Image (cartoon, rainbow, N blue to C red):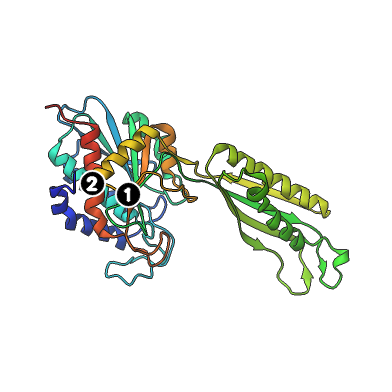
Amino acid sequence: MPIVNRIADLADEIAAWRRDFHENPEILYETVRTAGRVAELLRSFGLDEVTTGIGRTGVVGVIRGRNGGAGKTIGLRADMDALPIEEATGLPYASKTPGKMHACGHDGHTSMLLGAAKYLAETRNFDGTVVVIFQPAEEGGAGAKAMIDDGLMIRWPIDEVYGMHNMPGLPVGEFAIRSGPIMAATDEFGITVTGRGGHAAKPHETIDPVVIGAQIVSALQTIASRSADPLDSVVVSVTVFRAGEAFNVIPQTAQLRGTIRTLTPAMRDLAETRLRTLVASIAEGFGASAEVSFRRGYPVTVNHEDQTDFAASIAEGISGPGKVNRKVSPMMGGEDFSYMLEQRPGAFIFAGNGNSAGLHHPRYDFNDDLIPVGCSYWVKLVETALPAAA
């Protein structure tokens, strides 16, 4: 089950779509041009249905197999949005929009799924139905949830759903996956410490929120080192600390912000509880007050066991023996495909992007050599999951 010949023939055309998307990045739900181009291409491929405006700017396409679509329905998802980053690649097809770029490879994800859709619409070498899902706002906007809230899983009764993401550092042609938690829940917190300001030469007359904030930063690290089971994963990072404006004034308030990443619901709950307790007790101990805001972001991305085994077997058929890591370590980044996996069984897989800059880096670029690999993965997944009757 190597690279599909027809997909190899389409690779240059697919790469041209990808570079067009790369030149014209759109962030969050602003993917109007991208979605319009996706819908235009899907209609030109002869899909049975193309619906726009799902989850604001999402696109859904339907391809029915040789039996008219009766039976199982498989959903395949690609994300379309870019990031608010100034591109520094210097490529001929670099972003034409200042301050925005495809720094995570969603241009490639979209193009690979378009290539697979074109092939599947041409051949229809399967029984059942394929739903191709082009999603906005993966980068912090929960576009997957928006599409689900718009009836994605009900209007197109999807039985299983699959996602794919490129992975810099993993050679092109190789894949990585694991059953269970594969990416973390992403939560945000804000802390405002209110003390009593005053002259920096008279600290005894103040309640210094800077000192209190520093104590909080240190104490929050004990969530991982002293509150969590050493075998559980949790990351607590304070990424913002703002207080004061003058060298000789102790400010009235200090503001902290940060993120917590976890891989299980229990650890997620524990981390939030400990954060609130530590902040309140430290502030009280210094005679100050503290307010905590906590926003739960994407849930843990949890791959289902049977679908993970199936996805890994398809990947091995494309790449060959020893080219699929079935036990990749979980990653503490977040992914809103998690919402889809909460709704339906499925699996999220990583495909090698080669020796590129890292994701979200201003010099990152999607590797077009991945295109025939990724497209072939989608095609063979469908044809194997939905075999056509002899």
- Identify the mark at residue 139; answer none if there is no mark: none
Residue 40 shows up from this direction: no
Residue found 18% across the figure and 33% down from its top: 126
Residue type at tag 1: Phe
From what the image shows, is residue 336 above or below residue 193? Answer: above
Q: Which image quadrant is residue 45 in?
A: top left
Indicate left or right for 262 with 34 as reference: right
Q: Which image quadrant is residue 68 in?
A: top left
Residue 23 vs residue 11, the one in the foreground: 11
Residue found 22% across the figure and 25% down from its top: 70
| Label 2 sits on residue | 318
Indicate left or right for 299 with 272 as reference: left
Residue 118 vs residue 332, the one in the foreground: 332
Residue type at tag 2: Ile
The spot of residue 33 in percent (x, y) is: 31, 54
From what the image shows, is residue 90 above or below residue 355? Answer: below
Indicate left or right for 15 with 85 as reference: left
The spot of residue 255 in percent (x, y) is: 68, 58
Q: Earlier in the sequence, mark 2 or mark 1?
A: 1
The spot of residue 168 in percent (x, y) is: 37, 58
Work out which quarter of the rendered image holds the N terminus and state it.
top left
Residue found 62% across the figure and 43% down from its top: 229
Q: Are marks 2 and 1 in contact (CB under 8 Å)?
A: yes
Residue 28 vs residue 224, the one in the foreground: 224
- Identify the mark at residue 175; answer none if there is no mark: 1
Q: Which image quadrant is residue 205 in?
A: bottom right
